[in-house]
Image (tube, grey):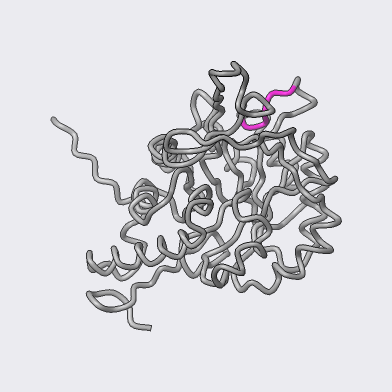
Amino acid sequence: MKKGGKGKTPDLSISLGPIVLKNPVIAASGTFGYGEEYSRVFPIKKLGALVTKGISLEPRPGNPPPRLAETPAGMLNAIGLENVGFNVFVREKMPFLRKVGCPIFVNMFGHTIDEFSELARRLSEIEGIAGLELNISCPNLRAGGSIFAADPRSVYKVVSRVRRVTGSFLMVKLSPNVADITPIARAAEEAGADAVSLINTLIGMAIDVVSRTPLLGNVTGGLSGPAIKPIGVRMVWQVAQTVRIPIVGMGGIVSATDALEYLIAGATAIQVGTAHFVDPRSSLKIIDGIADYLNRHRLPDLSKLIGSLRIERNS
């Protein structure tokens, strides 16, 4: 393959630890289903990787409707982590996922450290899974319902416990609903995470002023979409100065320019989520846009771009 220079094909491949992706664009959990839904739209093998819808040990029905509400420059969701559960996932979803042609990361969650540990152990025994993405934004039922991601000590406990039961690649998904994300990221790294992904959704709320009732059945939900991109970019930049493991950036990415911001801020790869609801082929357009940028700037690959933010400080 010709690489670098105007008119030639740049090398978009990146490494997340031992895992090599053909490009840095990953389909985010929760917005891409289990992959099969989008396989009718474009060849999924063109993606850098795919993160499945979140999986728990047992099936979950999710929250009562309404579950979605449109907001300016984004959307609120309160799906409630609905999923088919481990057994059905392995039996009905994995046969397809093994054939898609790109690495598969399984997003997983639990409400106790024991649940996280047991699910990670079981998933690690399944052929065709490249790694796990730990969603630590769910409530810790043994700690009064506060989310695991809110405290460095609870992050360290859950990640280190999972690390003890599996040798699989571990990516820890961080919540933006904290005062300072850097000690959270550092705790995940120290506990054995191979990468961190950020940001998850921000907590939001919308009200129907006619009925004076919440637009979501759960009252509050997670805000995603372009509105949260500046927060995501800022947090990725902060974490990039804190940890040495790879960072996967996400939050409001709908164009190649958005993705490039995250890469320049320090992300090694990015995840595309809500944009798929607007344009199911958005990930492919972002991949092409990144390649075009590298060509125009005569960059042979992504290595010179990642973490290349220039900050001029007045003396």
Residue at the (71%, 71%) spot, across then down = 98
Residue at the (69%, 23%) spot, across then down = 146
- Image: magenta residue range: 145-149
Along the line of sight, the residue nearer the viewer: 167 or 270: 270
Is the N terminus in the top left, top right, bottom left or bottom right quadrant?
bottom left
Majority SS type along the magenta span: loop
Image coordinates for residue 21, horizontal then vertical, percent: 52, 67
Residue at the (48%, 46%) spot, across then down = 250
Magenta span contains residue 244: no
Image coordinates for residue 207, horizontal then vertical, percent: 56, 22
Q: Residue furthest left?
A: 315
Residue at the (50%, 23%) spot, across then down = 179
Q: Residue furthest front?
A: 210
Whether residue 189 sits left or right of residue 64 in the image: it is: left
Is the C terminus in the top left, top right, bottom left or bottom right quadrant?
top left
Along the line of sight, the residue nearer the viewer: 313 or 43: 43
Q: Relative to 222, does residue 33 appear above or below in the rendering?
A: below
Along the line of sight, the residue nearer the viewer: 162 or 129: 129
Residue 246 seen in render:
no
Image coordinates for residue 18, horizontal then vertical, percent: 57, 64
